[in-house]
Image: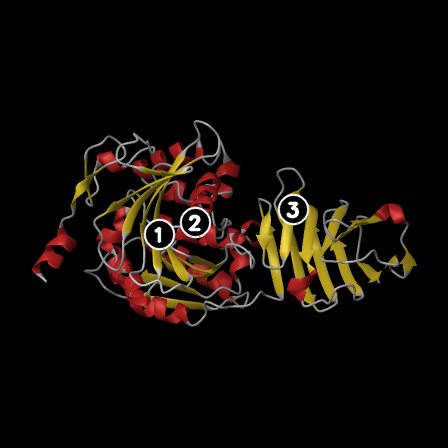
Amino acid sequence: MLAGLLLSCVLVLEPLPEDGAPFRWSESPLTHGPVVDTGVDWEARGRRRQRAVPGWAGGATYQLLLHAEEEGGPTERALLQVPAELEGRRVPLVVAFHGFGRTEREVFLDSDLPAACAKRGWALLAPYGLSDNDCGTPESRTALADLIGQLDDLVPLDRRRVLVVGHGLGAGSALRFAADHQDPRGLRVAGAVCHTPMPDLGVAFERGDERLRSSLIHSMGGTPKEVPKAYARSSAAGRMLSGLIDPSRAPLVHLQDVPIVLHANLADPDADRLADCLEVARFLQARGARVVEDLVFEPQGSGWRTLGLEAALDRLATSLDVGVPRNMDICADRPGQYGHVHVRKLDGDARGRARVEVAPGRLSVTGTRGLHELAIDLALTGTQPNEPVHVTWSSADGSEDRLVLIGYLRMPSAVHVDGVPVPGRRWSWNEEQRELLLLLDPGGLRLIEVLP
Protein backbone atom coordinates (compact mmCIF):
# COMPACT_ATOMS: atom_id res chain seq x y z
CA MET A 1 0.00 0.00 0.00
CA LEU A 2 2.77 2.42 0.99
CA ALA A 3 4.66 1.70 -2.20
CA GLY A 4 1.56 2.44 -4.26
CA LEU A 5 1.02 5.75 -2.48
CA LEU A 6 4.62 6.78 -3.04
CA LEU A 7 4.38 5.80 -6.70
CA SER A 8 1.29 7.96 -7.19
CA CYS A 9 3.09 10.98 -5.69
CA VAL A 10 6.49 10.92 -7.40
CA LEU A 11 7.44 8.83 -10.41
CA VAL A 12 11.03 9.26 -11.55
CA LEU A 13 12.95 6.88 -13.76
CA GLU A 14 12.76 7.11 -17.55
CA PRO A 15 14.75 9.48 -19.81
CA LEU A 16 12.76 12.32 -21.38
CA PRO A 17 12.60 12.35 -25.20
CA GLU A 18 13.25 16.07 -25.56
CA ASP A 19 16.79 16.07 -24.17
CA GLY A 20 17.52 12.73 -22.55
CA ALA A 21 17.01 14.02 -18.97
CA PRO A 22 15.39 11.70 -16.39
CA PHE A 23 11.65 11.27 -16.92
CA ARG A 24 9.48 12.93 -14.30
CA TRP A 25 5.73 13.06 -14.12
CA SER A 26 5.96 16.68 -12.98
CA GLU A 27 5.87 19.33 -15.71
CA SER A 28 8.81 21.62 -16.42
CA PRO A 29 10.15 23.79 -19.27
CA LEU A 30 11.71 20.61 -20.67
CA THR A 31 8.27 19.12 -21.32
CA HIS A 32 7.07 22.11 -23.40
CA GLY A 33 7.91 23.35 -26.87
CA PRO A 34 8.09 21.45 -30.17
CA VAL A 35 8.42 17.67 -29.83
CA VAL A 36 11.91 16.37 -30.58
CA ASP A 37 12.89 12.70 -30.84
CA THR A 38 16.47 12.18 -29.69
CA GLY A 39 16.19 8.43 -30.23
CA VAL A 40 17.09 7.69 -26.59
CA ASP A 41 15.62 4.42 -25.27
CA TRP A 42 12.73 4.32 -27.75
CA GLU A 43 11.37 1.20 -29.39
CA ALA A 44 10.61 1.82 -33.07
CA ARG A 45 7.32 0.61 -34.56
CA GLY A 46 7.23 2.12 -38.04
CA ARG A 47 6.65 5.86 -37.66
CA ARG A 48 5.75 5.33 -33.99
CA ARG A 49 8.22 5.37 -31.11
CA GLN A 50 7.27 4.03 -27.70
CA ARG A 51 8.56 3.07 -24.29
CA ALA A 52 7.02 1.95 -21.01
CA VAL A 53 6.89 4.42 -18.13
CA PRO A 54 5.83 3.90 -14.50
CA GLY A 55 2.04 3.57 -14.44
CA TRP A 56 -0.57 5.13 -12.22
CA ALA A 57 -3.41 2.63 -12.46
CA GLY A 58 -4.54 -0.35 -14.49
CA GLY A 59 -2.18 -1.97 -16.93
CA ALA A 60 0.90 -0.69 -18.72
CA THR A 61 1.52 2.99 -19.45
CA TYR A 62 3.48 4.12 -22.51
CA GLN A 63 4.98 7.34 -23.72
CA LEU A 64 4.49 7.61 -27.48
CA LEU A 65 5.83 9.62 -30.39
CA LEU A 66 4.41 9.60 -33.90
CA HIS A 67 6.46 11.02 -36.74
CA ALA A 68 4.77 12.67 -39.69
CA GLU A 69 4.71 10.77 -42.98
CA GLU A 70 6.73 13.49 -44.70
CA GLU A 71 10.42 13.82 -43.90
CA GLY A 72 11.07 16.53 -41.33
CA GLY A 73 7.38 16.94 -40.47
CA PRO A 74 6.14 17.57 -36.93
CA THR A 75 5.97 14.86 -34.28
CA GLU A 76 3.01 14.09 -32.00
CA ARG A 77 3.62 13.10 -28.37
CA ALA A 78 1.18 11.32 -26.06
CA LEU A 79 0.73 9.12 -23.00
CA LEU A 80 -1.28 5.91 -23.26
CA GLN A 81 -2.69 3.88 -20.36
CA VAL A 82 -3.80 0.35 -21.25
CA PRO A 83 -6.43 -1.63 -19.30
CA ALA A 84 -5.04 -4.38 -17.07
CA GLU A 85 -7.45 -7.00 -18.49
CA LEU A 86 -8.17 -7.07 -22.21
CA GLU A 87 -9.77 -10.53 -22.46
CA GLY A 88 -9.71 -10.55 -26.26
CA ARG A 89 -12.13 -7.63 -26.52
CA ARG A 90 -12.00 -4.27 -28.21
CA VAL A 91 -12.06 -1.55 -25.57
CA PRO A 92 -13.46 1.99 -25.53
CA LEU A 93 -10.95 4.83 -25.64
CA VAL A 94 -10.95 8.09 -23.69
CA VAL A 95 -8.93 10.88 -25.32
CA ALA A 96 -8.11 13.60 -22.78
CA PHE A 97 -6.99 17.08 -23.91
CA HIS A 98 -4.92 19.17 -21.49
CA GLY A 99 -5.61 22.79 -20.63
CA PHE A 100 -3.73 25.93 -21.62
CA GLY A 101 -0.10 26.09 -20.57
CA ARG A 102 0.00 22.44 -19.54
CA THR A 103 1.07 19.17 -21.15
CA GLU A 104 -0.34 15.66 -21.46
CA ARG A 105 1.00 15.00 -17.96
CA GLU A 106 -1.75 17.24 -16.54
CA VAL A 107 -4.33 14.53 -17.23
CA PHE A 108 -2.42 12.15 -14.96
CA LEU A 109 -1.37 14.73 -12.36
CA ASP A 110 -4.58 16.70 -11.84
CA SER A 111 -7.52 14.55 -12.93
CA ASP A 112 -9.10 11.29 -11.82
CA LEU A 113 -9.15 9.92 -15.36
CA PRO A 114 -6.39 7.30 -14.93
CA ALA A 115 -8.27 5.62 -12.06
CA ALA A 116 -11.69 6.09 -13.68
CA CYS A 117 -10.56 4.50 -16.96
CA ALA A 118 -8.76 1.64 -15.18
CA LYS A 119 -11.91 0.91 -13.18
CA ARG A 120 -13.99 0.60 -16.36
CA GLY A 121 -11.42 -1.29 -18.40
CA TRP A 122 -11.07 1.59 -20.87
CA ALA A 123 -7.91 2.85 -22.52
CA LEU A 124 -6.76 6.42 -21.86
CA LEU A 125 -4.82 8.51 -24.38
CA ALA A 126 -3.53 11.98 -23.43
CA PRO A 127 -2.05 13.88 -26.43
CA TYR A 128 0.38 16.76 -26.02
CA GLY A 129 0.00 18.02 -29.57
CA LEU A 130 2.71 18.99 -32.03
CA SER A 131 3.79 21.91 -29.85
CA ASP A 132 2.48 24.00 -26.95
CA ASN A 133 -1.31 24.44 -26.84
CA ASP A 134 -2.00 23.39 -30.42
CA CYS A 135 -4.14 20.25 -29.92
CA GLY A 136 -6.98 21.92 -31.82
CA THR A 137 -5.17 22.77 -35.05
CA PRO A 138 -6.00 20.72 -38.16
CA GLU A 139 -2.45 19.35 -38.22
CA SER A 140 -2.65 18.18 -34.60
CA ARG A 141 -6.11 16.68 -35.08
CA THR A 142 -4.85 14.76 -38.10
CA ALA A 143 -1.78 13.52 -36.21
CA LEU A 144 -3.93 12.41 -33.27
CA ALA A 145 -6.35 10.46 -35.48
CA ASP A 146 -3.32 8.90 -37.20
CA LEU A 147 -1.91 7.85 -33.83
CA ILE A 148 -5.20 6.32 -32.69
CA GLY A 149 -5.22 4.24 -35.86
CA GLN A 150 -1.82 2.77 -35.02
CA LEU A 151 -2.34 1.48 -31.47
CA ASP A 152 -3.83 -1.97 -32.06
CA ASP A 153 -0.59 -3.77 -31.22
CA LEU A 154 -0.69 -2.13 -27.78
CA VAL A 155 -4.44 -2.19 -27.13
CA PRO A 156 -7.31 -3.36 -29.39
CA LEU A 157 -9.48 -0.25 -29.61
CA ASP A 158 -13.13 0.08 -30.55
CA ARG A 159 -12.86 3.20 -32.71
CA ARG A 160 -16.61 3.68 -32.75
CA ARG A 161 -16.67 4.00 -28.95
CA VAL A 162 -14.34 6.93 -28.38
CA LEU A 163 -14.96 9.57 -25.71
CA VAL A 164 -13.24 12.95 -25.53
CA VAL A 165 -12.58 14.88 -22.34
CA GLY A 166 -11.04 18.32 -22.00
CA HIS A 167 -10.53 21.35 -19.80
CA GLY A 168 -10.55 24.99 -20.93
CA LEU A 169 -8.60 25.34 -24.16
CA GLY A 170 -8.43 21.53 -24.25
CA ALA A 171 -12.22 21.28 -23.98
CA GLY A 172 -12.57 23.39 -27.12
CA SER A 173 -10.06 21.12 -28.84
CA ALA A 174 -12.02 18.08 -27.67
CA LEU A 175 -15.25 19.43 -29.18
CA ARG A 176 -13.55 20.25 -32.46
CA PHE A 177 -11.92 16.81 -32.66
CA ALA A 178 -15.30 15.21 -31.95
CA ALA A 179 -17.03 17.32 -34.61
CA ASP A 180 -14.48 16.21 -37.22
CA HIS A 181 -14.61 12.51 -36.35
CA GLN A 182 -18.11 11.12 -36.82
CA ASP A 183 -17.35 8.24 -39.18
CA PRO A 184 -19.65 5.29 -38.34
CA ARG A 185 -17.29 2.91 -40.14
CA GLY A 186 -14.06 4.45 -38.93
CA LEU A 187 -13.19 6.75 -36.03
CA ARG A 188 -16.32 8.01 -34.30
CA VAL A 189 -16.48 10.08 -31.12
CA ALA A 190 -19.51 8.80 -29.21
CA GLY A 191 -19.51 11.22 -26.27
CA ALA A 192 -17.77 14.22 -24.69
CA VAL A 193 -17.09 15.66 -21.24
CA CYS A 194 -16.01 19.30 -21.43
CA HIS A 195 -15.00 21.62 -18.58
CA THR A 196 -15.66 25.31 -19.52
CA PRO A 197 -14.72 24.97 -23.22
CA MET A 198 -13.32 27.82 -25.31
CA PRO A 199 -15.22 27.33 -28.59
CA ASP A 200 -13.83 30.31 -30.55
CA LEU A 201 -10.06 30.81 -30.49
CA GLY A 202 -10.35 34.21 -32.16
CA VAL A 203 -12.50 35.43 -29.28
CA ALA A 204 -10.15 33.73 -26.79
CA PHE A 205 -7.27 35.68 -28.35
CA GLU A 206 -9.05 39.02 -27.96
CA ARG A 207 -9.89 38.30 -24.32
CA GLY A 208 -6.64 36.63 -23.38
CA ASP A 209 -3.54 37.87 -21.61
CA GLU A 210 -0.17 38.28 -23.30
CA ARG A 211 0.84 34.68 -22.54
CA LEU A 212 -2.26 33.22 -24.22
CA ARG A 213 -1.96 35.55 -27.19
CA SER A 214 1.70 34.70 -27.73
CA SER A 215 0.90 31.00 -27.60
CA LEU A 216 -1.93 31.31 -30.11
CA ILE A 217 0.20 33.41 -32.46
CA HIS A 218 2.83 30.67 -32.34
CA SER A 219 0.28 27.88 -32.98
CA MET A 220 -1.75 29.66 -35.66
CA GLY A 221 1.01 31.56 -37.40
CA GLY A 222 -0.33 35.02 -36.60
CA THR A 223 -3.16 36.99 -35.05
CA PRO A 224 -6.84 36.43 -35.89
CA LYS A 225 -6.73 39.46 -38.21
CA GLU A 226 -3.66 38.12 -40.00
CA VAL A 227 -4.73 34.46 -40.35
CA PRO A 228 -8.49 34.31 -39.68
CA LYS A 229 -8.91 30.95 -41.43
CA ALA A 230 -6.31 29.32 -39.17
CA TYR A 231 -8.31 30.33 -36.10
CA ALA A 232 -11.62 29.30 -37.68
CA ARG A 233 -10.28 25.87 -38.66
CA SER A 234 -9.04 25.27 -35.13
CA SER A 235 -12.25 26.37 -33.37
CA ALA A 236 -15.36 24.37 -32.52
CA ALA A 237 -17.59 27.35 -33.34
CA GLY A 238 -17.40 31.01 -34.31
CA ARG A 239 -19.06 33.68 -32.21
CA MET A 240 -21.04 36.67 -33.48
CA LEU A 241 -20.74 40.18 -32.01
CA SER A 242 -23.82 39.40 -29.92
CA GLY A 243 -21.89 36.61 -28.21
CA LEU A 244 -24.07 33.92 -29.75
CA ILE A 245 -22.60 31.09 -31.80
CA ASP A 246 -22.84 31.67 -35.55
CA PRO A 247 -24.52 28.57 -37.10
CA SER A 248 -22.69 29.20 -40.38
CA ARG A 249 -19.32 28.80 -38.60
CA ALA A 250 -20.09 25.99 -36.17
CA PRO A 251 -18.75 22.46 -36.80
CA LEU A 252 -20.39 21.83 -33.41
CA VAL A 253 -23.59 21.03 -35.34
CA HIS A 254 -22.12 17.61 -36.18
CA LEU A 255 -22.57 16.72 -32.49
CA GLN A 256 -26.33 17.16 -32.28
CA ASP A 257 -26.75 13.40 -31.73
CA VAL A 258 -23.68 12.94 -29.49
CA PRO A 259 -24.24 12.93 -25.70
CA ILE A 260 -22.23 15.70 -24.05
CA VAL A 261 -21.62 16.69 -20.44
CA LEU A 262 -20.73 20.39 -20.09
CA HIS A 263 -19.23 21.31 -16.72
CA ALA A 264 -18.66 24.74 -15.21
CA ASN A 265 -17.82 26.07 -11.78
CA LEU A 266 -20.15 29.04 -11.21
CA ALA A 267 -17.61 30.41 -8.72
CA ASP A 268 -15.08 30.82 -11.54
CA PRO A 269 -14.09 34.52 -11.53
CA ASP A 270 -13.79 34.47 -15.34
CA ALA A 271 -17.36 35.34 -16.36
CA ASP A 272 -16.50 35.07 -20.06
CA ARG A 273 -15.55 31.42 -19.70
CA LEU A 274 -18.84 30.68 -17.99
CA ALA A 275 -20.71 32.50 -20.75
CA ASP A 276 -18.86 30.41 -23.36
CA CYS A 277 -19.89 27.17 -21.68
CA LEU A 278 -23.53 28.19 -21.32
CA GLU A 279 -23.69 29.37 -24.93
CA VAL A 280 -22.32 26.04 -26.19
CA ALA A 281 -25.06 24.31 -24.17
CA ARG A 282 -27.77 26.65 -25.50
CA PHE A 283 -26.65 26.23 -29.12
CA LEU A 284 -26.62 22.44 -28.98
CA GLN A 285 -29.83 22.08 -26.95
CA ALA A 286 -31.65 24.30 -29.45
CA ARG A 287 -30.80 21.65 -32.07
CA GLY A 288 -32.06 18.76 -30.00
CA ALA A 289 -28.66 17.66 -28.71
CA ARG A 290 -28.41 15.52 -25.59
CA VAL A 291 -26.49 17.96 -23.41
CA VAL A 292 -26.24 17.68 -19.64
CA GLU A 293 -25.20 20.88 -17.85
CA ASP A 294 -23.11 19.96 -14.82
CA LEU A 295 -22.92 23.21 -12.84
CA VAL A 296 -21.32 23.53 -9.41
CA PHE A 297 -20.47 26.40 -7.07
CA GLU A 298 -17.14 25.76 -5.41
CA PRO A 299 -15.30 28.99 -4.45
CA GLN A 300 -12.28 27.02 -3.27
CA GLY A 301 -12.22 24.65 -6.22
CA SER A 302 -10.40 25.02 -9.52
CA GLY A 303 -9.37 23.06 -12.59
CA TRP A 304 -10.18 19.42 -13.04
CA ARG A 305 -11.05 18.85 -9.39
CA THR A 306 -14.50 20.45 -9.59
CA LEU A 307 -15.51 18.05 -12.35
CA GLY A 308 -17.19 14.86 -11.16
CA LEU A 309 -15.63 12.56 -13.73
CA GLU A 310 -17.10 9.36 -12.32
CA ALA A 311 -20.67 10.62 -12.67
CA ALA A 312 -19.96 12.17 -16.08
CA LEU A 313 -18.45 8.98 -17.49
CA ASP A 314 -21.32 6.94 -16.04
CA ARG A 315 -23.77 9.16 -17.95
CA LEU A 316 -21.95 8.51 -21.20
CA ALA A 317 -21.25 4.81 -20.67
CA THR A 318 -24.86 3.92 -21.51
CA SER A 319 -24.74 5.87 -24.79
CA LEU A 320 -21.62 4.50 -26.46
CA ASP A 321 -23.55 2.55 -29.10
CA VAL A 322 -25.52 5.42 -30.60
CA GLY A 323 -26.67 4.77 -34.18
CA VAL A 324 -26.05 6.94 -37.21
CA PRO A 325 -28.27 10.05 -37.08
CA ARG A 326 -31.03 10.23 -39.68
CA ASN A 327 -31.00 14.00 -39.90
CA MET A 328 -28.06 16.33 -39.51
CA ASP A 329 -26.63 19.68 -40.47
CA ILE A 330 -23.26 19.84 -42.20
CA CYS A 331 -20.77 22.64 -41.50
CA ALA A 332 -17.43 21.36 -42.79
CA ASP A 333 -14.25 23.28 -43.51
CA ARG A 334 -12.41 20.13 -44.58
CA PRO A 335 -13.38 16.92 -46.42
CA GLY A 336 -14.44 14.07 -44.17
CA GLN A 337 -17.13 11.60 -43.13
CA TYR A 338 -19.94 13.04 -41.01
CA GLY A 339 -22.45 10.33 -40.19
CA HIS A 340 -23.84 8.96 -43.44
CA VAL A 341 -22.51 11.99 -45.37
CA HIS A 342 -19.04 12.13 -46.92
CA VAL A 343 -17.93 15.62 -47.89
CA ARG A 344 -15.49 14.77 -50.68
CA LYS A 345 -14.61 18.19 -52.03
CA LEU A 346 -15.32 21.80 -51.10
CA ASP A 347 -15.52 24.82 -53.38
CA GLY A 348 -12.03 26.20 -52.82
CA ASP A 349 -11.60 27.47 -49.26
CA ALA A 350 -15.35 27.68 -48.67
CA ARG A 351 -17.07 26.11 -45.68
CA GLY A 352 -19.42 23.36 -46.89
CA ARG A 353 -22.93 23.56 -45.48
CA ALA A 354 -26.15 21.64 -46.01
CA ARG A 355 -29.13 20.10 -44.25
CA VAL A 356 -29.32 16.35 -44.83
CA GLU A 357 -32.29 14.10 -43.95
CA VAL A 358 -32.44 10.43 -44.89
CA ALA A 359 -34.85 7.52 -44.84
CA PRO A 360 -34.85 4.23 -46.75
CA GLY A 361 -35.13 5.13 -50.43
CA ARG A 362 -35.45 8.87 -49.71
CA LEU A 363 -32.84 11.59 -49.32
CA SER A 364 -33.15 15.31 -48.76
CA VAL A 365 -30.10 17.54 -49.22
CA THR A 366 -31.07 21.19 -49.05
CA GLY A 367 -29.45 24.61 -48.70
CA THR A 368 -26.06 23.49 -50.01
CA ARG A 369 -23.28 26.07 -49.86
CA GLY A 370 -19.61 25.65 -50.66
CA LEU A 371 -19.98 21.96 -51.50
CA HIS A 372 -18.44 20.70 -54.72
CA GLU A 373 -18.99 16.96 -54.18
CA LEU A 374 -21.06 15.20 -51.54
CA ALA A 375 -21.43 11.42 -51.21
CA ILE A 376 -24.05 9.45 -49.27
CA ASP A 377 -23.63 5.79 -48.36
CA LEU A 378 -27.00 4.21 -49.17
CA ALA A 379 -26.40 1.28 -46.83
CA LEU A 380 -26.16 3.68 -43.86
CA THR A 381 -29.55 5.17 -44.80
CA GLY A 382 -31.30 1.78 -44.79
CA THR A 383 -31.79 1.84 -48.56
CA GLN A 384 -31.72 -1.57 -50.22
CA PRO A 385 -29.37 -2.11 -53.18
CA ASN A 386 -30.86 -0.80 -56.43
CA GLU A 387 -34.26 0.12 -55.09
CA PRO A 388 -35.67 3.41 -56.43
CA VAL A 389 -34.14 6.44 -54.74
CA HIS A 390 -35.98 9.75 -54.41
CA VAL A 391 -33.82 12.81 -53.75
CA THR A 392 -34.88 16.34 -52.84
CA TRP A 393 -32.08 18.77 -53.59
CA SER A 394 -31.56 22.53 -53.44
CA SER A 395 -28.50 24.76 -53.77
CA ALA A 396 -28.30 28.04 -51.88
CA ASP A 397 -25.17 29.45 -53.53
CA GLY A 398 -26.02 29.09 -57.23
CA SER A 399 -23.25 26.62 -58.00
CA GLU A 400 -23.34 23.21 -59.65
CA ASP A 401 -23.10 20.34 -57.17
CA ARG A 402 -22.06 16.72 -57.55
CA LEU A 403 -24.00 14.10 -55.58
CA VAL A 404 -22.62 10.56 -55.33
CA LEU A 405 -24.76 7.63 -54.19
CA ILE A 406 -22.43 4.98 -52.76
CA GLY A 407 -23.53 1.34 -53.03
CA TYR A 408 -25.70 1.56 -56.13
CA LEU A 409 -24.91 -1.91 -57.48
CA ARG A 410 -26.17 -1.73 -61.07
CA MET A 411 -26.54 0.99 -63.66
CA PRO A 412 -29.98 2.60 -63.26
CA SER A 413 -32.38 2.46 -66.16
CA ALA A 414 -33.08 6.19 -65.96
CA VAL A 415 -32.66 9.34 -63.88
CA HIS A 416 -35.45 11.93 -63.79
CA VAL A 417 -35.29 15.50 -62.50
CA ASP A 418 -38.66 17.12 -61.86
CA GLY A 419 -40.24 14.29 -63.85
CA VAL A 420 -38.07 14.84 -66.95
CA PRO A 421 -35.48 12.22 -68.06
CA VAL A 422 -31.92 13.47 -67.59
CA PRO A 423 -29.41 13.10 -70.45
CA GLY A 424 -26.65 10.57 -69.84
CA ARG A 425 -24.03 13.32 -69.75
CA ARG A 426 -25.55 14.58 -66.47
CA TRP A 427 -25.04 11.32 -64.62
CA SER A 428 -22.71 8.33 -64.70
CA TRP A 429 -22.32 4.97 -62.97
CA ASN A 430 -18.96 3.57 -61.88
CA GLU A 431 -19.16 -0.22 -61.98
CA GLU A 432 -15.88 -0.76 -60.12
CA GLN A 433 -16.73 1.60 -57.27
CA ARG A 434 -20.49 0.86 -57.36
CA GLU A 435 -21.19 4.59 -57.30
CA LEU A 436 -23.75 6.71 -59.09
CA LEU A 437 -22.70 10.30 -59.84
CA LEU A 438 -25.36 12.97 -60.41
CA LEU A 439 -24.45 16.44 -61.75
CA LEU A 440 -26.98 18.87 -60.35
CA ASP A 441 -27.68 22.27 -61.92
CA PRO A 442 -27.74 25.31 -59.63
CA GLY A 443 -31.09 26.74 -58.76
CA GLY A 444 -34.08 26.05 -56.61
CA LEU A 445 -35.63 22.85 -55.38
CA ARG A 446 -35.08 19.77 -57.51
CA LEU A 447 -36.92 16.43 -57.25
CA ILE A 448 -34.71 13.60 -58.51
CA GLU A 449 -35.74 9.99 -59.13
CA VAL A 450 -33.22 7.21 -59.71
CA LEU A 451 -34.96 4.23 -61.31
CA PRO A 452 -33.43 0.70 -61.24
Mark 1 vs 2: CB contact within 8 A:
yes
Element on which disc 1 rests: strand
Image height of 41 relative to 307, above or below: above
Element on which disc 2 rests: helix
| Front label number (3 vs 2) | 2
Residue behind mark 2: 148
The spot of residue 210 in percent (x, y) is 31, 36
Left or right of residue 230: residue 78: left
* Residue in view at x 50 percent, y 33 percent: 227
| Front label number (3 vs 1) | 1
Q: Pick whichever of labels 1 and 2 is earlier in the sequence.
A: 1
The spot of residue 431 in percent (x, y) is 78, 50
Q: Amino acid at mark 3?
A: Arg
* Residue in view at x 28 percent, y 66 percent: 119
Q: Name the residue at the top extreme.
A: 72
Q: Pick whichever of labels 3 and 1 is earlier in the sequence.
A: 1
Label of residue 125 in the image: 1
